[in-house]
């Protein structure tokens, strides 16, 4: 191996799963036995112990007065949501469908918040009737909620999602700053808060979400500080005291070569300072951190079986029964500008020292159906199991499973 090859960036170690008898272990089961238990490939598997461990890790660094919410858009599998309800302080939903899953799972309506830029009147009615907190994102929603509150005889609980005048630097997706479909522009906030007061809605606070998938703790701390300070300023025009302040999330996980895991300690220290300030500046407010990907992403794997091994002009292709229709993000077609490989291995040959350069592709009739492009992987044959790590978030529910009529994948919590 040349010096240049040794200096190429590599994936962060995927050591959250152990290896037994040469196979990856997920949820305490060797991969081949897990596949037999599931009864088919492809499938997603989410490890309960890793989900619990991630929440416990966060609890160790977050101040006790900061509430931890799960943003279930990252993974709305009902069994997983049920587990998360038992671990976190609240659930954030983005549709009436997600709201039903959260409430069915036993989430406390007082600790459920509902965000989204295009809430239909029927969804707003469901949210008011359920008693959850609605993150208002437009003037129209205030008008609709006033009518719904009158109709149902219930005051709608509302916070306002603010589109700030800053963004989360270094984030994978910027959700605030500049023109955005999300929230209400900060310069329009005094007028909106006045409308909420006139409408008689039960105002509780603010929701600020500047961006997502950030691996720079200093950027997250800066965004949290700016969000907090903006909320303090906006509170001067609020019709009622601020009781709820969602500072968003943005915590990233390492997907691609060269990325490193997030430093939580500095984020915890920063939040402790904000909690201290809030005791005098926003004395009735609960501070909330809203996380999705960071809570569940590393606890999940996508598993597909090799159905063919082909060599085309010297390049090895491992053809599997899964692909972009199940895992759009791993294929690079879910927001990547330049395609990069997720961490991938041959889970049934996990500790093999016999390596080769190969590409993992799916069964679809498109060159976009690519799960690994010329990666160094254990030598694999038909019947072996391919594993895509970092697959607990934005997987099955974020993929076009009806594309080309192939079977859907299963999901299991183990």
Image (cartoon, rainbow, N blue to C red):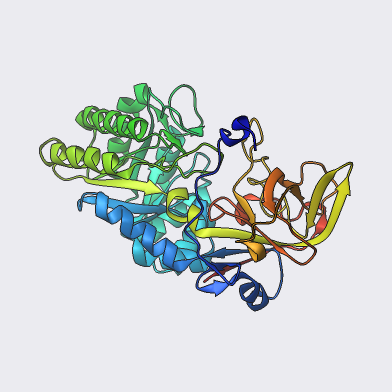
Q: Position of residue 359 (x, y in %)?
A: 75, 47
Residue 57 is left or right of residue 352, and the answer is: left
Q: Is residue 394 above or below residue 187?
A: below
Residue 196 relative to residue 371: left or right: left
Quarter-of-image position of residue 163 = top left
Q: Is residue 89 left or right of residue 179?
A: left
- Picture coordinates of residue 199, whole percent (x, y): 32, 40
Percent position of residue 131, x then y: 35, 58
At 68% from the left and 44% from the top, the residue drawn is: 375
Tell me which corner region of the image, top left, top right, bottom left or bottom right, holds residue 19: bottom right
- Res. 375 visible in picture: yes
Determine the residue positioned at 78% across, 54% down: 318
Q: Position of residue 148 (x, y in %)?
A: 42, 50
- Figure quadrant of the N terminus: top right
Nearest the camera: 50 or 352?
A: 352
- Does 162 sit above or below residue 121? above
Residue farthest along the right direction in this orientation: 313
């Amino acid at each position: 191996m040349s010096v240049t090859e040794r200096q190429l960036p590599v994936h962060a170690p995927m050591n959250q799963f152990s290896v037994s008898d040469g196979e990856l272990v997920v949820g305490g089961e060797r991969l081949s036995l897990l596949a037999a238990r599931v009864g088919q490939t492809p499938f997603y598997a989410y490890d309960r112990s890793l989900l619990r461990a991630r929440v416990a890790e966060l609890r160790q660094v977050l101040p006790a007065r900061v509430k931890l919410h799960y943003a279930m858009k990252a993974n709305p599998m009902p069994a997983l949501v049920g587990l998360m309800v038992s671990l976190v302080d609240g659930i954030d939903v983005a549709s009436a469908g997600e709201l039903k899953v959260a409430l069915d799972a036993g989430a406390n309506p007082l600790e459920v918040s509902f965000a989204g830029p295009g809430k239909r009147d029927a969804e707003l009615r469901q949210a008011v009737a359920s008693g959850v907190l609605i993150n208002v994102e437009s003037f129209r929603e205030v008008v609709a909620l006033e009518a719904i509150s009158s109709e149902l005889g219930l005051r709608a609980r509302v916070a306002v999602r603010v589109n700030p005048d800053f963004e989360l630097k270094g984030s994978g997706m910027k959700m605030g700053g500049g023109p955005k479909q999300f929230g209400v522009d900060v310069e329009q906030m005094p007028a909106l808060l006045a409308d909420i007061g006139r409408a008689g809605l039960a105002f509780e606070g603010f929701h600020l979400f500047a961006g997502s998938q950030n691996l720079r703790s200093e950027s997250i701390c800066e965004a949290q500080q700016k969000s907090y300070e903006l909320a303090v300023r906006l509170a001067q025009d609020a019709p009622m005291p601020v009781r709820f302040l969602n500072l968003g999330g943005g915590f990233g996980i390492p997907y691609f070569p060269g990325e490193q895991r997030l430093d939580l300690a500095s984020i915890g220290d920063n939040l402790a300072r904000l909690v201290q300030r809030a005791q005098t500046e926003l004395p009735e407010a609960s501070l909330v951190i809203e996380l999705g990907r960071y809570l569940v992403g590393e606890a999940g794997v996508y598993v597909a079986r090799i159905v063919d091994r082909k060599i085309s002009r010297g390049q090895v292709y491992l053809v599997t029964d899964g692909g972009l229709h199940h895992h759009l993000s791993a294929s690079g077609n879910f927001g990547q500008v330049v395609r990069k490989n997720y961490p991938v291995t041959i889970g049934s040959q996990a500790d093999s020292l016999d390596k080769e350069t190969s590409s993992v592709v799916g069964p679809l009739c498109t060159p976009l159906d690519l799960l690994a492009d010329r990666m160094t992987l254990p030598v694999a044959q038909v019947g072996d199991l391919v594993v895509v790590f970092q697959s607990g978030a934005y997987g099955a529910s974020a993929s076009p499973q009806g594309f080309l009529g192939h079977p859907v994948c299963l999901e299991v919590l183990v």
